Amino acid sequence: MTHGDNDPFELEAMIALRRDLHRHPELGFEEVRTSDIVARWLEEAGIEVHRGLGKTGIVGTLRVGTSSRAIALRADMDALAMPELGDVPYKSTTANTMHACGHDGHTVMLLAAARHLARTRRFSGTVHFIFQPAEEGRGGAQAMLADGFLDRFPIDAVFGLHNMPGLAPDEMAVVAGPQLASSDSWEVTFHGVGTHGAKPHLGRDAMTSAAHFLTVIHTIVARRVDPLQPAVVSACAITGGDFRALNVIPDDVRIGGTARAYSAQVRDQLEAEIGQLAAGVASMFGIRASYSFKRRIAPVINDAGATAAAFAAASVVTGKPVVTDFPPSTAGDDFAEFSNLIPGCYVWLGNGPAVGGALHHNSRYDFNDAAIPTGARYWTALVEQELV
Ligand SMILES: [Zn+2]
Ligand SMILES: [Zn+2]
């Protein structure tokens, strides 16, 4: 591969690789081909490679100079289980699998920076390049931590990046505080006593309890959570009864949904309040409710110090002022697993206009290759500024 002063990030090769990854997307914990390519390109650049963290995760380690300071830069590698409906020439060749969140671009930008840093070595300290599997709700960050990531690779700070349609590809947003919401799921089952639909008085109606619960659940956000704190509680699934038996009141009705918050306190509150309401409504109708709350992804909350470092790096790589008032997203990212333990900062990099309105997780979304140089420059500047 050719590279030089006017092509520090091997741009042509990186764009080709991004499109190759796009053509061959892999779901969480199945990134065998992707992680193998990443490992080989890191090794070729002389970077120490550790395979198999969190099954398909890779950590590349580059040590330069004498400083004991260490930071980690994280990219995610997985695709989504959905069909690609756009018609790019490098369209997915795997049925019902698509890079609809731009993780192909994230992987390539970090790889480009890693190879550049391995050549130029203008820093002192240790940088660990995290190529994480399974960000899309499958627990890749947790799996890497469970495999001893922090013991094997002690770090002082951790940094993440996600593309964002709507910002220009040479534009970045760096904001302290909450960036992404917690993303948890909950289930309530009302256990009544089933009976003949014509004789409701002989049973205990779980259906009516469920209906009441669905109307009062919105009082959690409206009446219980601090109005200055964002929160979402949504019911998203309900099952009970059978359309082939419309004369039967069922024993049980099951409801499930999502809960989102931007602080640990509100997250705890949502967990408690949903269960309390379910129990209260059930008792109002003389029945019982079972409740479970599954913590999936913690909120991503940027540390002030790490954010100052990210801002300084973003300031020197983009021709545009760094956006510092970008609103948080109600989506989630398991980068929080790292940044809950180590001071961290998660930034946004523009992906250009949302072509045809295609945002993340849209079947026509595509990562914008014009963002690759900005992302690679950001990672490089961050390392050179942080490890001195
Ligand atoms: Zn996504
Ligand atoms: Zn994503």
Image (tube, rainbow, N blue to C red):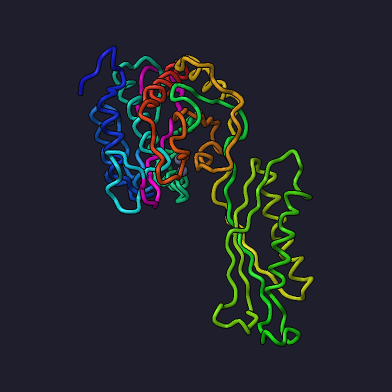
Q: In the displayed structure, does residue 169 sit left or right of residue 18?
A: right
Where's the C terminus, which quadrant?
top left
Q: In the displayed structure, does residue 118 sit left or right of residue 211?
A: left
User: Percent position (x, y) of residue 316?
Assistant: 47, 14
Q: Nearer the viewer, residue 165 or 151?
A: 165
Q: How many marks on residues? A: 0
Whether 9 is among the magenta residues is no
Q: Nearer the viewer, residue 68 or 206?
A: 206
Where's the N terminus, which quadrant?
top left
| Quarter of the rendering containing residue 331 | top right
Residue sticking out furthest to the front: 356
User: Percent position (x, y) of residue 340?
Assistant: 56, 38
Residues drawn in magenta: 59-85
Q: Is residue 237 above or below residue 10?
A: below
Q: Is residue 242 above or below residue 175?
A: below
User: Percent position (x, y) of residue 144?
Assistant: 42, 44
Q: Nearer the viewer, residue 307 or 121?
A: 307
Residue at point 69%, 44% (across, down):
265
Whether 80 is among the magenta residues is yes
For ligand 2, which image quadrant applies?
Answer: top left
| Quarter of the rendering containing residue 324 | top right
Q: In the displayed structure, does residue 19 sit left or right of residue 323?
A: left
Residue sticking out furthest to the left: 1
Residue at point 61%, 69% (across, down):
254
User: Percent position (x, y) of residue 6?
Assistant: 29, 13
Q: In the displayed structure, does residue 353 sit left or right of residue 84?
A: right
Q: Is residue 176 above or below residue 3?
A: below
| Quarter of the rendering containing residue 104 | top left
Residue at point 71%, 40% (across, down):
229
